[in-house]
Image: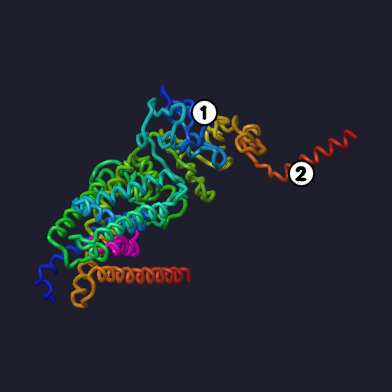
Amino acid sequence: MLEPFAYDFFVRGFVVAGLVGALCGLMGIYVVLRRMSYIGHGLSHAMLGGAVVSYVMAFNFYLGAGLWGFLSALLINATVQRRRMLGADAVIGVITTASFAVGVALISRYRTFTRNFEAALLGEILGIQPQDLLAVAVMTVLAAVFVFFCYRRLLFVTFDPEVAGYYGVPVQWLDSLFALALAGTIVVSMQVIGVTMLVAALVIPAATARLLTDSFHRLALLSVGIGALSGVAGVYISYYLDISSGANVVLVTTGAFALAYAWSALRHRLAAIQGLRALD
Amino acid sequence: MLHPFPHEPRGETPLVEFRGVTCGYGGTTALVDVSVSIWEGEFVGLLGPSGAGKTTFLRAILGAVEIYRGQVLVEGRPHDRGRAPAGYVPQVETVDWNFPVTVEQVVLMGFAGRGWLPWASKEERERARAVMERLGIAHLAGRHIRALSGGQQQRAFLARALVSSPRLLLLDEPTAGVDIKTRDDILHLLHELNHDGTTIVLTTHEINAVAAHLPRVICINQRVVADGPPAQVFTPEVMSRTYGAPMTVVHHEGLVLVAERPHRYYEEHLARSRASEGDGDA
């Protein structure tokens, strides 16, 4: 059972999958409850453009892609607010796919990169280097600190952003900080789980937790727990099945969602039966 | 009637003052040249058709609209968004009832602008508990907001507004969509809060059931049409100017009742009158 832990690359992958799962589970709470799943999907694609541009310009990958994602998020917010006739989904579609296209165009133009962009697209958990692990760990700590100190404000802003402003919550500041934290989360997770599957890590743990509880506090803990456990379980199982670790993490998380869905349906059915019995 | 007489205004300066305010959103005006003073201890109802600017009036007090001309003063000073000493209760239609929060979590949001720890302090919890007990919802503290009745939901949001002991309470259609008994309960509760010193401004579409029982009513249709006690304000002329349709005002056993005149009936009646006048002339 402990055989895979004899390999350094596996230990790094195991740890990083747990951290990315917890980090995406944490940020995913707000992404799901604010119905922003599409922005998570779009930003992860947009950042590929930023990642490629930072390589072409010999700029730090994390800084370049993170800044690119943050600016994309701000641009989406600004465009949605100024041109309300365009829905947020249309604006996200325009900005993020254009950004993704920049990345693809640059990859096809400059074919000699030291960085493997397949990893960014599909993920490479077991090929993670110590510096990538460090980046994920630092981002996890920063996101945890952000959520810890802004927890009550974030809850109000997520529940009702307009009214939160009337109660003295600095909504625009929080939105900008959240966009920054989300951009950071996506950029460090990109190398691990891949652009194409990142949105699953962001959305599924929180959606699963939502099926299990009606309390925000419990939902927050459950989402982080489900994300972390699915991450480590996915990597561990993938070692024995010899399949892509990133894909397996997503499959394990989806399995957790299916179980929660079945449990939720069963609970509703039992409640209905109990209600009918009470009437008799 | 809950309030047969208006309260005597307290203080030297109004708690809220609109000085020739024209305001709106994105260049579109919602209120035009509004001048109104609301004094500490008053209980004011804003009446008008949909799109008349009632909610904008509340949002102007909260500093959440664009002011194109004039000034809104709170406690004699221009203010910023989120700084008004006001508790705000939104229309329940705007609430996401599937959001995973319990009643207590909603009530504690009233303190969200303070402190940096993720949990509420002991004092905050005690205050929230005291307000919930006063509003009769303490036993529902752990329940999800969707699992409440309309009146209980309204009380939960009222409790959120009250935990910080605001001097001014702003309510956007607090009796919309609730049954007669719940409406009566909410009005009595607001009446008690007002008598304890809280200044209240609410918007309503219910002329007879709500506005007629308030000490002061402001009729709005982008501009202030009339301002005063219902007995003075509810006249056919004011109602017609406010709603853009003829309305009948009936005085019955000290009550003022406003009846909407169905257009067809009115037109038929007008036609019959003209016809009979024509016959007379002939």
Q: From the top left corner, tell me how far across and down residue A110 is, in percent.
A: 24, 58
Rendered location of residue A226, percent (x, y): 26, 64
> Which picture quadrant has residue B146?
bottom left
Q: Residue at x 23, y 44 (%)?
A: B116
Residue holding disc 2: B268
| Label 2 Cα crowd, 10 Å radius (few <14 / some 14-19 / many 20+) | few
Q: Nearer the viewer, residue A216 or B127?
A: A216
**Is residue A43 in sight in this rendering?**
yes
Whether residue A225 appears in this view of the structure is: no
Residue drawn where x is 11% and y is 75% of the image: A3
- The residue indicated by pointer 1 is B33
Callout 2 secondary element? helix
The image quarter in which residue B97 lies: bottom left
Q: Main secondary structure of the magenta part?
A: helix
Horizontally, residue B235 falls left or right of residue B80, namely right
Residue B100, image x and y in percent? 35, 56
| Residue B107 in the image: above or below residue B169 | below
Q: Residue furthest left?
A: A6
Instruction: Tell me the kind of residue under disc 2.
Output: Glu
> Closest to the observer: B34 or B125?
B34
Q: Earlier in the sequence, mark 1 or mark 2?
A: 1
Q: Which residues are magenta?
A: A190-214
| Residue type marked 1 | Asp
Q: Residue at x 22, y 64 (%)?
A: A119
Tell me: residue B209, above or below residue B100.
above
On screen, residue B231 above or below A35:
above
Q: Nearer the viewer, residue B217 or A98?
A: A98
Q: Quadrant of residue A125?
A: bottom left
- State the separation of the CA atoms marked 1 and 2: 38 Å
